[in-house]
Amino acid sequence: MITLKKEDGAADLAGITKLSVGVNWDPSAGSSGGILGMARRKRGVDLDLVAVLMQGGEPLRFAGLDSLDPIGNGAVAHSGDEQTGAASSDDETVNVVFSDVPAVIDSIVFIAAAFKKGSSFEKANNVSFKIYDATGGDTQQVADIRPSLLGAENADAIARTFRNGPVRQLEVLDRKGRIKQGDMQALLRFAIG
């Protein structure tokens, strides 16, 4: 596994034709034990993975929430909304097939957010963002980003892929911030930076 860190800068994705980004988390009961704690863990917390497709500094489309295939050809496809964090591996994923992404899209920003009202990173344990080379059907992990548990932020711009001339590159961002929950415009502005 190649491990990328924020301080490494951008890495070339030469030879990688399909990329997969996943977010996983475990539900937390907070400080509640007993039956109340079990109920809270079962209900979980809803984090959302969103891929924002950009042209220059402008968001054009997004995959996530209720938009699973924004281009309509499977080039950027979201796995669907996992609302509890109870999945055994990545709770939500976005798959990107670079050859099918229209040329007008020059970058894709991947964000994990506690987008829906009442959800928060504080109610999740063991949050992890994983990036895989999914070329040829196999998946090889190329990055594992684990955000700090400190802070009251409810969004994290995980990473972005972008074209640098003919080469695609991947940059780990791990940029935390706050967005107004339920506000799509706030989420899109956060993607811009």
Image (cartoon, rainbow, N blue to C red):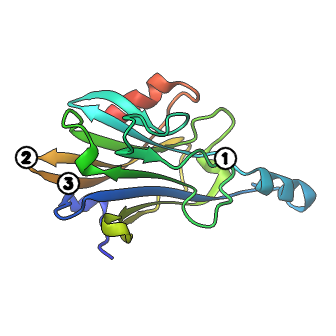
Instruction: Please give the residue where the numbered disc 2 appears in the rendered image.
Output: 165
Element on which disc 1 rests: loop
Label 1 environment density (alpha carbons within 10 Å; few <14, some 14–19, many ≥20): some
Question: Can residue 35 be seen at all in this image of the molecule?
Answer: yes
| Residue 83 badge | 1
Whole-angstrom CA distance, mark 1 to mark 3, is: 31 Å
Q: Position of residue 42 (x, y in %)?
A: 79, 55
CB atoms of marks 1 and 3 within 8 Å: no
Residue on which the image places disc 3:
169
Q: Quadrant of the N terminus?
A: bottom left
Q: CA distance from mark 1 to mark 2?
A: 38 Å
The first of marks 1 and 2 along the sequence is: 1
Report the amino acid beneath label 3: Gln
Crowding around mark 3 (Cα neighbors within 10 Å: few <14, some 14 to 19, many 20+) is some
Quadrant of image for the C terminus:
top left
Q: CA distance from mark 3 to mark 2?
A: 10 Å
Residue at the location (62% across, 43% down)?
A: 120
